[in-house]
């Protein structure tokens, strides 16, 4: 079963601010070069525009291509180029979380779940499936040994 990531207002605001900063950092020199200098250097302008497009494309890719798939023996978490296979037998605990700033996270909402598992660099992964109740039901069926802390 495949779940997409929930997208909330906080995430949209964070991404809008991030995209505005990237646009300002890459397109301001282009505007300055075009409008305030007598001889604009077109290779530099094209490089900055290309850099802007690559950065924006990457940010949109990692923001909108987030999904979580249940397989027979593991949960597959994918967000852009970032992927994780979490074996059900390695999971130890799942709890609700609203911490979207720190830790290993592949999400787009403050309404999130934190899955703790063995063999993890950060100790857990924070995700935000769109239908949390159904996601939790399937997860607890496949990994019945894990502790679920209702908060």
Image: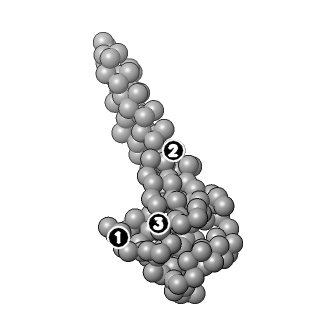
Between disc 3 and disc 2, the foreground one is: 3
Q: CA distance from mark 1 to mark 3?
A: 9 Å
- Above or below, 129 relative to 98: above
Q: Position of residue 56 (x, y in %)?
A: 47, 39
Q: Residue 135 placed where, x, y %?
A: 64, 70
The answer for how far apart the CA atoms under marks 3 and 2 are is: 22 Å
Q: Quadrant of the C terminus?
A: bottom right
For marks 1 and 3 on the same chain, the one whose residue lies earlier in the sequence: 3
Q: Is 39 left, or right, of 62 in this rendering?
A: left
Residue closer to the observer: 32 or 145: 145
Q: Is residue 42 left or right of residue 11?
A: left
Measuring 40% from the left and 42% from the top, which residue is drawn there? 22
Q: Which mark is residue 61?
A: 2
> Which one is earlier in the sequence, the residue at label 3 or at label 2?
2
Among the two numbered marks 2 and 1 on one chain, the one whose residue lies closer to the N terminus: 2
Q: Secondary structure at mark 1?
A: loop
CB atoms at circles 1 and 3 under 8 Å apart? no
In the drawing, what numbered circle is on residue 86?
3
Callout 1 environment at 10 Å: few (<14), some (14 to 19), or many (20+)? few
Q: Residue at x 36, y 28 (%)?
A: 48
| Residue occupying the point 40% across, 27% down | 50
* 123 over 18 or under it: above or below: below
Crowding around mark 2 (Cα neighbors within 10 Å: few <14, some 14 to 19, many 20+) is some
Residue placed at 58% from the left, 56% from the top? 67
Instruction: Name the residue carrying label 1.
Output: 119
Instruction: Say above or below: 123 vs 9.
Output: below
In contact (CB < 8 Å): disc 3 and disc 2:
no
């Amino acid at each position: 079963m495949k779940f997409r990531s929930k997208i909330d207002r906080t995430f949209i605001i964070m991404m809008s601010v991030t995209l505005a900063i990237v646009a300002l950092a890459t397109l301001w020199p282009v505007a300055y070069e075009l409008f305030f200098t007598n001889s604009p250097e077109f290779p530099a302008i094209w490089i900055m525009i290309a850099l802007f497009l690559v950065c924006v494309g990457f940010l949109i890719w990692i923001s909108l291509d987030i999904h979580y798939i249940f397989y027979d023996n593991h949960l597959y978490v994918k967000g852009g180029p970032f992927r994780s296979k979490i074996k059900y037998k390695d999971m130890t605990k799942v709890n609700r979380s609203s911490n979207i700033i720190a830790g290993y996270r592949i999400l787009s909402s403050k309404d999130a779940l934190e899955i703790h598992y063995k063999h993890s660099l950060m100790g857990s992964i924070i995700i935000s499936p769109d239908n949390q109740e159904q996601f939790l039901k399937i997860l607890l069926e496949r990994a019945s040994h894990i502790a679920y802390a209702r908060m």
